Amino acid sequence: MASFTRRVAGDGAVSWRVQIRIRGHKPVAKTFARKTDAKRWATRTESDVRSGLYLRTRESEKRTLGDLIERYKGKRLAALASSANVAAQLDRWAAELGHMRLCDVTPAVVADVRDKLAGETTVRGTLRSPARVNRYLAALSSAFQLGLKELGWVDDTPMRQVSKLKEPRGRVRFLSAGELARLSDACRESNCAPLYSVFLLAVSTGMRKGEVMGLRWADVDLKGGWASLAKTKNGEPREVRIAGEALDLLRAHAKVRRLDSDYVFPSHNGRKPLDIRKPWTLAVEAAELSDFRFHDLRHTAASYMHMSGAAQKDIAEVLGHKTLAMTNRYTHLTRERIAETTERMTAQFFPSRRGAK
């Protein structure tokens, strides 16, 4: 219920203090110059208090986007496989909008920054891709979901009304047998000794670059041939089978491993994973590959699994995909295999009638 108290100041000015008390809720109060304004506020606020909206409104007026981003980084970031990328994306949002109150971060404000990101050139001199811009939006959306569902700082998220940029169709790039042989030789001959092991692990297991480089010896079962990935892109842990030459190389590598670092592939100081960007680029150039990225090794692994007869659901399990739709983007058949499949089916069910009497 709302109670109203009339007050008269020393100079004769009149004000009205309204206080709302509802069982189970903290009392709220505010002072107005006119009683009509006090009544209007009391009616609206009493309804908000009963529905739980008032507290969230007050928090959104008190907290800034910077506060929300810092809370998200403290509670969620460590569990993400791509934590470094997400942290950088959130830092950019904090730089752009971190000073703003949560209640003032509207869809229009977010969309303005989205368009700004899309119009900027990267260190490579090209415009930031739509997919990359959408990753920035996804990072901010995750932060707002925390504020909405767990912290109660906002009543809704502005991200629901911010459109993502249209992305081109997924890349269809994987290694042919000849390309695989050339890249394998280039990695083996690289001045970066661990590069061949990294390459073989990625192409034989389908692990992402961050998953391979983030491997720690505690995650690897050398006897059984398994790797346990606690941090993955979709947030769910998974087990990865390691076999063949990749396992042989890991076992040999373990015999001469550095004792000052738990990383399987440590940097020079041992405090973080090895940076293979330069040696990888040189290996791709030496193999004379065009338009090929490290992530395409994951495409290659999925495609070769598919061509070896593996079922889609099994490939999805290996790669850690939640849906078969995602796996379908990775499982490409070579033209030769397509020809064999089509011709075999045609010969059986639709044989040529040429020469038939």
Image (cartoon, rainbow, N blue to C red):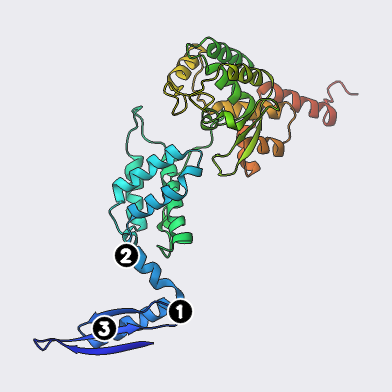
What's the residue type where badge 1 is placed? Gly
Q: Where's residue 118, x and y in %?
A: 36, 41
| Residue underneath mark 3 | 37
The picture places residue 259, in percent across and down from the top left corner, at: 51, 22
Q: How many marks are shown on the rendered structure? A: 3
Q: Amino acid at mark 2?
A: Glu
In the displayed structure, would residue 86 be above or below residue 193?
below
Separation of marks 1 and 3 at Cα, in angstroms: 26 Å
Q: Earlier in the sequence, mark 1 or mark 3?
A: 1
Residue at x 53%, y 14% (from the top left corner): 187
Identify the residue at image location x=66%, y=26%.
242
> Which numbered disc flags the more N-terminal residue, 2 or 3?
3
Residue located at (33% from left, 57% from top): 105
Find the residue positioned furthest to the left. 11
Farthest residue to the front: give it.
259
Q: In the image shown, does 49 or 281 lie closer to the viewer?
A: 49
Foreground disc of the pair 2, 3 = 2
Between 72 and 144, the one lying in front of the other is 72
Tell me residue 262's x, y (percent): 52, 28
**Residue that mark 2 sits on:** 61
Residue designated by label 1 = 24
**Kind of residue indicated by mark 3:** Asp
Answer above or below: position of 185 versus 108.
above
| View extreme (right): residue | 357
Residue 313 appears in view? yes
Disc 2 on helix, strand or loop?
helix
